[in-house]
Amino acid sequence: MDATITPLADYACNTGEGPLWHPDQDAVWWTDIPAGKLFRFDCRTGEHHPVDIGRPVGGFTIQEDGRLLLFLDRGTIAVLNPDGSLVPVIDEIPDETTTRFNDVAADPEGRVFCGTMPTADRKGRLYRLDTDGSLHLVLEDIGCSNGIGFTPDRTGMYYTDSFAYTITRFEYDRSTGAISNPHLFSKAEEGGGFPDGMTVDRDGNIWSARWDGSCLVRYNPEGEETGRIAFPVLKVSSVVFGDADMGAMYVTTAGGDTKETDGPEAGTLYRVVVPGARGVPEFRSRIRVPA
């Protein structure tokens, strides 16, 4: 596939993840999960800097007011204020105190689907955080809860279980947030990398990152692979569209602590342009924050 790949910022992230384009700031945010840090890349100036959260950030969304809603360890969910303070939405989830969130996505109505990692005695889960702050268990027995996206007509939701090598498509009810009638959308070949974070473009194509697979994979809406973009690193972790025209992808990578095996640029944030590929803005969360 014809693509221009540009490295932007190398923080040697152990687990660089969850890129989000922030249109209010012309900036890209991403996380290094175990380091407890967020990073911000200003696309107007090229400047970038870390923000120390002090706890693992498994994923985040952008609230309507522009603040970030963080999904942390122990089931904690909190809003990040500009001064760096956190405003708790949920202090912790009793069943998740030994694990953390992993990849989240706001839906068209401002709810957030948020997955958790497995614990020592059970597999992962997928929750839905409603706008009133209530939390609902949606799925259990997940190997590794990962990338989430919605069809352009908002009637379907894609959901990735990395350890099962699958992306599943559910019917999605926008009015209630309910998902139903799952069917297999794609299954990656074992040994070729795990499907990780993902995004959906304006034409309904799915772009899936490949952890341990050194690439992005594009699928058409029927689940057929239609292209790959190779990267010089092993762990390609997630992708989001951005820029004013939504014509660039921002791609996170991991393995910055093992560059000798994962590649000299492992843990880098990349900008990728594919002629003709355009995204749509990610949905914003509308979660009620306690006063």
Image (cartoon, helix red, strand yellow):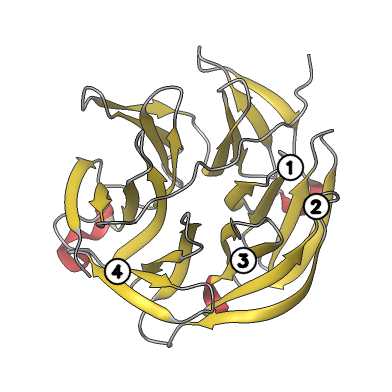
Tag 4, which secondary structure? strand
Label 3, residues with CA under 10 Å away: few <14, some 14-19, many ≥20:
many
What distance separates the C-alpha of mark 2 from that of mark 3?
14 Å
Check contact, mark 2 vs mark 3: CB within 8 A: no
Going from N to C along the chain, the mark reached first, 1 or 3, is: 1
Q: Amino acid at mark 4?
A: Cys
Going from N to C along the chain, the mark reached first, 2 or 4, is: 2
Q: Which residue is at 61% across, 20% downward?
A: 65
Going from N to C along the chain, the mark reached first, 2 or 1, is: 1
Q: Which residue is at 46% across, 46% downward?
A: 33
What distance separates the C-alpha of mark 1 from that of mark 3?
15 Å
Q: Amino acid at mark 3?
A: Tyr
Q: Which residue is at 25% across, 24% downward?
A: 44
Which residue was labeled with disc 1?
A: 111
Q: Nearer the viewer, mark 2 or mark 3?
A: 2
Which residue was labeled with disc 3?
A: 159
Nearer to the camera, 15 or 128: 128
Nearer to the camera, 134 or 74: 134
Q: Amino acid at mark 2?
A: Gly
